[in-house]
Every structure is written in structure tokens, then in C-alpha cells.
Image (spheres, rainbow, N blue to C red):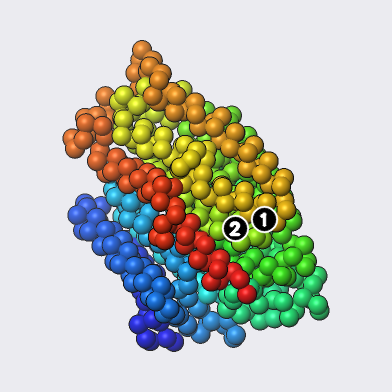
């Protein structure tokens, strides 16, 4: 077991949310101040620890925690540039979503249960981000399923319980497929640490069929959480969960865990040479492309705002899988940038949708008329991120899609540009009407469904509860800055280019 500070720090990052979460389970419902203190303390400590790791990695430090678990496959937490990109996103958005959830759930029941599982969910997410081998990744991948299930069914309605059963069926089935794939790889070559350029090349000549089978099992297993078609069915149903949970599922935890697993699988397990020699990237690329178009087409037909955003996630997350499947350095950089950009934009959109629902009772697209006059700051945040999702320059979404397009040209797959253009047009078709309704349409004579009912307990800002508005503005601002300052050394794009140069090239 590693006992140096470089060994302890990765474990401390996981424990910084795990320990507060376990303590929160013991609190009574009326211990609001202590629960809030533990939530915010854990989130702040995690940010500080992640900042220390980021600084250490930039200075060449190696963060590695090992604990014996299985023969030749122990628990390994490893802080490299790729893992810290995901951990940084999770940590920043955990703090923002914690603030948002405190305001959103004001007056609600079972808050200790909610925030306890909320913290466990973040612990599992950073654990799989820091995982240094497939066994560790699978352990936290399955813990993430168990931690998020109670959040999906939190309201306890029949619809929520049904969505929870579907969620478990999909994700546990995906976990079983991933387990079979990892076991197959372990049986033929052991479980090595994630390696620059992959570690399976020496096995290719003798075990090519097994490697292809294992890859298919792992892509299917990770593809469930990544919402690749036809494995996406759980995601729209999970929208019955409270808005903070939806934001967590779509921007921070579950779908990102799936695509992050695909990134590790392609670049740090198989490697570009093995992928290319066995032609494994083509099926992944086709499925990702189909998912991008399919998700956008389904979003067009949704009249429920959260479901429209859910199908948008199905499409947008597959941009990352698309970039991974291209196997080019520019496409990989675009995919990694989009991992952050999509997270910032999508969490903002769900924050806004939740604020609309809690403040005015707005749940459907038709009810969004005139929102810009009643909730201008929230609607402005929604607009910024919707334009980013379309890919309007200089928004963050444009930057990552630009690099994905360059990556498609770099590997001579010009048809990939058509996928990106068609998707952008479809994105515009389902986002622009929302923007138009919010700013340029007058609300109906009856007003909004629940404005008077909810306004009686809004005393902090004229627009809404400040804990609902401030997170929207904060994450929208981050997404805007990520696009405006993409050329900066501190941007998600620059970090993605660093990862490609340092960890994806053998």
C-alpha cells in the first residue's frame, strides 16, 4: 500500500466525498445546517485536493495508490492528466450542483438520504476517473450504479419506481457484459495498468479473436451508461428524477463514466495500433454516428423539456465516442474537450429546466413562452448553452466540434463532416424554437402553471431562489469562457491536446 503523499492524495480525493456522505446518512431531517455544512465542506476539500494533484501532475509528480485485491489485479488509483480532467469537471460541478440541490430541495422530505447517496455517487465517479486498471474501474463503475439508483427513484412515484427498475436492468446488464470482457482479457494476458499506447499488442497475433470478443463485450458494457443506441432506453425514462439528479446523470456521472471507459479502453488498453490492425474502431464509429443523428431526431419530437434535453444528451455524448473511434490525435483532442464542454453546457441546461419548473411550474416546451421576461438571467444562461450545443462560434461546443471535424479530415473520413453538419442542423432545429419562445413569444393568458404557488417562498431574488439562479450563471459562464479562451493554456482544449501528446501516443 502506498503511504507517501503522492499515494495518499488519490485516496483522499475519493474519501473527501465518501466520508461526508456516510455522515449525512446519520443526520435527522431537521439538521439542515449540519447537512449543508458537511456537503459544502466535502466539496471544497475535494476541489483543494484536486488542485494539488493538478499542480503536481504539471510538475511531473506521479500519484499512485495501490491496495491488494485480486492476484495480479489490485485496487489502483492513478492520477494522470486524463483522469484529472474528468475529476476536475466532477469536482467543480459537484460543488455547483450541491448548492443548486440545497435550494431545489428546500422544504422537501428525505434530504439526508438524497445528499448521502449524492455524495456516494460523486465518490464512485472520481474513483473510476482515477482508476489505474480495468478491475478498479469496474469496481467503481458498479458502485456508481448502486449509488445512483436511489437518486433516480427518490420521489417514490410509480413512474419513478418503473424508471428505476429499467435503469437497474440496463446498467446491471451492462456491468455484467463489462465483467465478462475484463475477465476474458485477464485470462489471456492478466490485468495490467492503463498504459500509454495500450498493453495488448503482444497478444494480438495469438489471441486476435479473443481480443475482438472482449472489445465487443466492453463496448456494450460501457455503451449502456454512454447511452449508445440501442442501449440508451434508460436515459429518457430517468428524467422523472429531480433536476439535480438529471444534471448529475447527464453532465457529471453516469453518461460520462461510460464514454470515459471507452476512452480508456481504446487508448490505454488496446491502443491505436491494435485497434487499427483488428479494425475495431469502425463499428464503434458507425454506432456513435448513428447515435448522434438518432438522438437529435428524437429530441425534435419531444414536448417535455427535460426529455428533449435527455435525447440531446444521447446525441451529444456520442460526439466523444465518435472522436475516439476516429483514432486521430485531433479528433481525440476534440473528444476530450467535448467531455468538459458538454458537461458544462448540459448541466446548465438542466439547472435552468429545474429552475423553470420549481419557480413557474414549467415542464413543457409550450409553457416556455415569455420566460426571458420573467426569468431573464436563467433564460440567458439557457440561451448561451443551447447555442453552444448547436455549435455556434465562439461557444465551447463549436471548439470541440471544429476539432472533431479536423480530426475526421486528418484520418481521411470526410463523411464524418456530414455527420457533424447534419447533427448541428438538427440541434438548431430543436434548440432555436426554445430560445425563440423564451425571448420573443408572449405567455398565454393563463400565465405559467404554478407561479403564484411557488413565489410565496421565494424571498432572496426577484427571479427565483438564489441557489437556483447562481449555479446556472456560474456554469454558463464557465462554458462561455471555455470557448472564448480555447487558445489559453488552461482551457479544456489545451488540456485535451496535452493528454493526447502525453498519454495517447506510444
Q: Is residue 5 visible?
A: yes
Q: Which mark is residue 410?
A: 1
The residue labelled by disc 2 is 330
Q: Quadrant of the C terminus?
A: bottom right
In the rendering, at what x and y percent does residue 386 appear?
46, 37
- CA neighbours of label 1 inside 10 A, class few (<14), some (14 to 19), many (20+): some
The mark total stands at: 2
Mark 1 element type: helix
Q: In front here: 497 or 135?
A: 497
Q: Is residue 13 visible?
A: no
- Residue at image location 36% in from the left, 68% down from the top: 50
Instruction: Determine whether 473 is above or below 257 in the image.
Output: above
Q: Which mark is residue 358?
A: none
Quadrant for residue 48, please give it. bottom left
Q: Earlier in the sequence, mark 2 or mark 1?
A: 2
Q: Residue furthest front?
A: 487
Q: Quadrant of the N terminus?
A: bottom left
- CA neighbours of label 2 inside 10 A, class few (<14), some (14 to 19), many (20+): many
Amino acid at each position: 500500500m502506498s503511504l507517501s503523499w503522492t499515494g495518499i492524495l488519490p485516496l483522499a480525493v475519493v474519501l473527501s466525498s465518501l466520508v461526508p456522505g456516510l455522515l449525512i446518512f446519520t443526520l435527522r431531517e431537521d439538521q439542515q445546517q449540519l447537512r449543508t455544512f458537511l456537503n459544502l465542506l466535502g466539496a471544497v476539500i475535494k476541489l483543494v485536493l484536486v488542485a494539488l494533484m493538478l499542480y503536481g501532475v504539471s510538475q511531473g509528480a506521479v500519484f499512485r495508490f495501490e491496495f491488494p485485491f485480486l492476484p495480479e489485479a489490485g485496487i489502483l488509483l492513478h492520477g494522470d492528466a486524463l483522469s484529472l480532467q474528468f475529476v476536475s469537471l466532477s469536482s467543480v460541478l459537484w460543488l455547483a450542483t450541491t448548492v443548486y440541490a440545497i435550494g431545489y430541495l428546500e422544504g422537501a422530505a428525505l434530504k439526508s438520504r438524497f445528499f448521502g447517496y449524492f455524495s456516494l455517487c460523486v465518490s464512485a465517479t472520481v474513483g473510476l476517473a482515477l482508476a489505474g486498471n480495468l478491475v478498479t474501474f469496474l469496481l467503481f463503475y458498479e458502485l456508481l450504479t448502486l449509488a445512483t439508483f436511489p437518486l433516480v427513484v427518490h420521489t417514490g412515484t410509480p413512474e419513478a419506481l418503473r424508471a428505476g427498475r429499467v435503469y437497474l436492468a440496463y446498467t446491471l446488464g451492462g456491468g455484467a457484459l463489462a465483467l465478462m470482457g475484463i475477465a476474458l482479457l485477464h485470462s489471456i494476458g492478466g490485468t495490467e495498468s492503463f498504459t500509454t499506447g495500450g498493453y495488448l499488442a503482444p497478444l494480438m497475433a495469438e489471441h486476435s479473436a479473443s481480443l475482438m470478443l472482449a472489445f465487443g463485450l466492453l463496448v456494450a458494457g460501457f455503451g449502456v451508461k454512454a447511452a449508445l443506441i440501442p442501449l440508451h432506453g434508460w436515459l429518457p425514462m430517468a428524467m422523472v428524477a429531480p433536476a439535480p439528479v438529471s444534471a448529475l446523470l447527464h453532465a457529471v456521472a453516469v453518461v460520462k463514466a461510460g464514454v470515459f471507459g471507452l476512452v480508456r479502453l481504446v487508448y490505454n488498453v488496446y491502443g491505436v495500433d491494435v485497434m487499427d490492425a483488428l479494425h475495431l474502431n469502425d463499428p464503434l464509429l458507425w454506432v456513435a454516428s448513428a447515435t448522434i443523428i438518432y438522438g437529435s431526431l428524437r429530441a425534435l419530437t419531444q414536448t417535455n423539456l427535460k426529455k428533449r434535453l435527455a435525447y440531446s444528451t444521447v446525441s451529444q455524448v456520442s460526439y466523444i465516442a465518435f472522436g475516439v473511434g476516429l483514432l486521430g490525435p485531433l479528433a481525440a483532442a476534440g473528444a476530450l474537450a467535448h467531455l468538459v464542454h458538454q458537461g458544462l453546457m448540459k448541466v446548465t441546461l438542466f439547472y435552468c429546466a429545474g429552475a423553470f419548473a420549481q419557480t413557474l411550474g414549467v415542464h413543457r416546451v409550450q409553457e416556455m413562452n415569455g420566460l426571458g421576461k420573467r426569468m431573464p438571467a436563467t433564460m440567458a444562461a439557457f440561451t448561451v448553452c443551447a447555442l453552444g450545443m448547436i455549435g455556434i462560434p465562439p461557444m465551447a461546443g463549436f471548439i470541440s466540434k471544429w476539432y472533431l471535424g479536423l480530426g475526421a479530415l486528418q484520418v481521411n473520413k470526410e463523411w464524418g463532416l456530414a455527420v457533424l453538419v447534419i447533427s448541428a442542423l438538427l440541434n438548431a432545429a430543436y434548440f432555436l424554437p426554445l430560445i425563440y419562445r423564451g425571448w420573443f413569444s408572449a405567455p398565454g393568458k393563463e400565465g405559467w402553471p404554478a407561479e403564484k404557488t411557488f413565489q410565496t417562498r421565494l424571498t432572496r431574488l426577484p427571479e427565483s431562489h438564489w441557489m437556483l439562479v447562481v449555479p446556472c450563471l456560474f456554469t454558463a459562464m464557465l462554458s462561455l469562457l471555455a470557448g472564448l479562451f480555447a487558445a489559453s493554456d488552461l482551457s479544456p482544449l489545451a488540456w485535451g491536446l496535452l493528454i493526447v501528446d502525453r498519454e495517447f501516443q506510444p
